[in-house]
Image: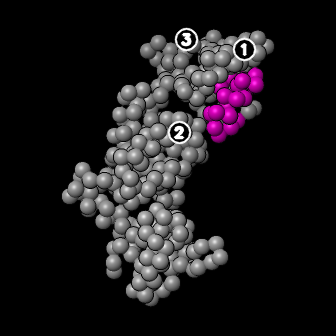
Amino acid sequence: MDLEELQTFVEVAHAGGLSPAAQRLGLSKSIVSRRLARLESELGVRLLARTTRGAALTDAGIAFRDHAVRIVEEYEAARAAITPGGDLRGHLRVAAPASFGPAQFAPVLAALARRHPLLHIHACYSDRSVDLIAEGFDCGIRFGPLQTSSLIARRVGTFQGKIVASPDYVRAHGAPQTPDELAHHQVLMQGTERWLLVDGRKTITVQPKGRFKADNVVALAAAAVAGLGLAYVPDGVADHELASGALIPVMTDYPPIAIGIYVVRPPDKRVPRKIAVLTELLIEHFHRA
């Protein structure tokens, strides 16, 4: 079986059709079509069903895709092992948080793409807990503390945050001075959560409550601007609102602890080079920040 044909099939499966795959491969559509025809002839099955909208994987194509991806990735890993300084190739699928990701992680992924023009990068920004293995991601970028899992984590940096409220909220309800006073305030939350606050050399755990929840801290910052309550926001998320006075820090004597930022990946003794390179770029980025 020709590896080039496998790589072409993987590209078509990822791109969702022959034309976009041909464009990404820098080949004509006819060459891509011939490679797929040879692969189907070798296997004795149809991998693609041509439709008016392009091409869709058949049941056999879906079943074969994951195996083909692994074969291509193993080849890329073997080539990287003997040419460690060469260009990265293949695909890198990354899951990153939507609240913090576009501002902090997108520039790093763009730098990775510039340095390695043969690497195809697909970043998915979502604040939900993505199942990396089930959804086919190579790695994810997450904030700590991390939940216990089989994933392998590497810390790449930290971020600090603050508790904020609008001036209108503070005029109407006052500002909490101690963690105990949070019980008397509306807190804007991403779910049922804990806040870890610094009290001198101690860490205090509080479990705030509130009626407004959102799975995105940008949305929580907007709700805080509207006067709905207190919000915990990472530095960089609400800088404009803080600079304009639409939000003000509160309870500054008890700041939230610094939160770790991690690259997580499925369990494997071998670290794929594309993930290792991304990890080092993130470490460099947060070291400069």
Say which element carries label 1. helix
Asked if 287 appears above or below 44 in the picture, the reply is above
Give the side of residue 84 with respect to residue 107, left or right.
Answer: left
Which element is circle 3 on?
Answer: loop
Q: In the rendered image of this protein, does residue 157 appear above or below residue 29?
A: above
Residue type at numbered disc 3: Asp
Mark pair 1, 3: CA separation: 18 Å
Report the magenta residues as a range.
213-231
Q: Residue at x 59, y 23 (%)?
A: 239
* Mark 1 Cα shell of 10 Å, populated few (<14), some (14-19), many (≥20): many
- Give the labeled residue for mark 1: 167
Indicate which disc residue 253 carries. Answer: 3
Dots 1 and 3: beta carbons under 8 Å?
A: no
Q: Position of residue 202 (x, y in %)?
A: 46, 17
Question: Farthest right residue?
Answer: 172
- Location of the N terminus (image quadrant): bottom left
Task: Identify the amino acid type marked 2.
Answer: Gly
Q: Position of residue 140 (x, y in %)?
A: 46, 47
Q: Amino acid at mark 1?
A: Pro
Q: Earlier in the sequence, mark 2 or mark 1?
A: 2
Q: Nearer the viewer, mark 1 or mark 3?
A: 1
